[in-house]
Image (cartoon, grey):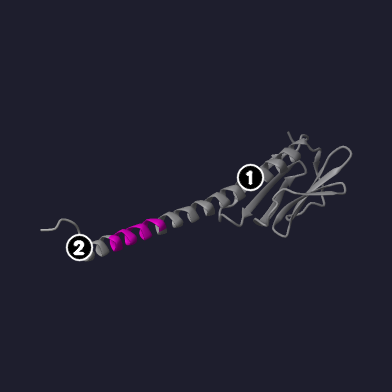
């Protein structure tokens, strides 16, 4: 008797190996796609949280909130200048004097709302596009302590 594998046995073994490898690669690519999507959402959420911290910090350092502020825009007053925050094309915009800075560089915010309890206290909420959750914050100007 001859020792070894028949052609049929080799074809079956190679076919099974190809099927197993294809399944593993398919699973791996799905996992990598999910990781990239999650990383993008997390990066966007961190950017929005950073914008919230910037707004809180500047409200706390200000003298107060301008009475012309409304639910879509806040204007905070300092000794010699003002800073405003609003939502422009899905981006949180900060305007100080003539310069404009976007705190969220991509269009990652679906809503930005402000509410005012008094001239020294502001609450704000941001709804990022990438996550359905609503992020909220509150800050007092230095006059409101």
- The first of marks 1 and 2 along the sequence is 2
User: Who's the residue at 53% across and 52% down the image?
Assistant: 36
Secondary structure mainly formed by the magenta segment: helix
> Which span is picked out in magenta?
14-25
User: Who's the residue at 53% across and 54% down the image?
Assistant: 37
Q: The residue tagged with tag 1: helix, strand or loop?
A: helix
Q: Considering depth in this image, is 11 or 51 the residue closer to the camera?
A: 11
Q: Is residue 81 left or right of residue 126?
A: right
Look at the image and say whether residue 68 sits in the magenta stretch.
Answer: no
The residue furthest bottom is 8
Q: Is residue 115 left or right of residue 12?
A: right
Q: The residue tagged with tag 2: helix, strand or loop?
A: loop
Cα distance between the residues tagged 1 and 2: 64 Å
Q: Which mark is residue 6?
A: 2
Disc 1 residue crowd, few under 14, some 14–19, many 20+, Cα 10 Å? some
Q: Considering depth in this image, is 90 or 138 the residue closer to the camera?
A: 90
Residue occupied by mark 1: 49
């Amino acid at each position: 008797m001859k020792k070894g594998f028949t052609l049929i046995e080799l074809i079956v073994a190679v076919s099974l190996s190809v099927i197993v490898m294809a399944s593993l690669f398919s699973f791996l690519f799905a996992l990598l796609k999910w990781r990239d999507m999650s990383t993008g959402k997390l990066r966007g959420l961190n950017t929005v949280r950073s914008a919230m911290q910037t707004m809180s910090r500047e409200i706390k350092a200000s003298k107060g909130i301008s009475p012309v502020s409304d639910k879509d825009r806040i204007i905070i007053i300092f000794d010699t200048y003002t800073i405003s925050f609003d939502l422009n094309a899905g981006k949180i915009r900060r305007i100080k004097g003539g310069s404009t800075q976007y705190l969220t560089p991509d269009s990652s915010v679906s809503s930005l709302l402000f509410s005012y309890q008094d001239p020294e206290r502001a609450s704000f909420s941001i709804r990022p596009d990438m996550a359905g959750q609503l992020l909220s914050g509150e800050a007092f100007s230095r006059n409101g302590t």
